[in-house]
Amino acid sequence: MQFQITVRYGGRYQRYHTFQVEAENARQAMVDGAQHIPDEIANQTDLVELRVFVDPDARKFVGEDE
């Protein structure tokens, strides 16, 4: 399963680092994803979000034909 991880970092001016990880489940995605957080932002990180990745090109929107 493909997961998207977003890391918020920075002090007064917050920034975001987003990447995808392939894992069997959410727990494994968090473990594997931790290795992808760059060293230079690891100490500045204050929030990590994990969600199932949805390919924007494959996503259906309300009102689109099936």
Image: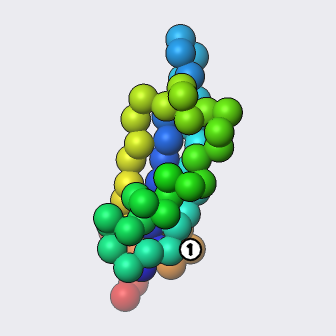
Task: Report the label total.
Answer: 1
Up the image or down, 23 lies above or below 34; here it is below
Up the image or down, 35 lies above or below 58; here it is above
- Please state, as top left, top right, bottom left or bottom right, where the C terminus lies in the image: bottom left
Can you give x and y, in whole percent of width and height, for residue 51 in the image? 37, 59
Disc 1 crowd, CA 10 A, few/some/many (<14, 14-19, 20+): few
- Please state, as top left, top right, bottom left or bottom right, where the N terminus lies in the image: bottom left
Q: Is residue 40 left or right of residue 44?
A: right
Q: Is residue 33 left or right of residue 36?
A: left
For residue 59, say whether it is visible: no
Report the amino acid beneath label 1: Asp
At horizontal 49% and vertical 31% (from top left) the residue drawn is 45
Up the image or down, 22 lies above or below 9; here it is below
Q: Nearer the viewer, residue 18 or 36?
A: 36
Instruction: Look at mark 1 in the image and give the residue it sits on.
Output: 57
Q: Is residue 45 left or right of residue 13?
A: left
Can you give x and y, in whole percent of width and height, for residue 13 in the image? 57, 16
Can you give x and y, in whole percent of width and height, for residue 18 in the image? 57, 49
At horizontal 59% and vertical 54% (from top left) the residue drawn is 36
At horizontal 52% and vertical 67% (from top left) the residue drawn is 21
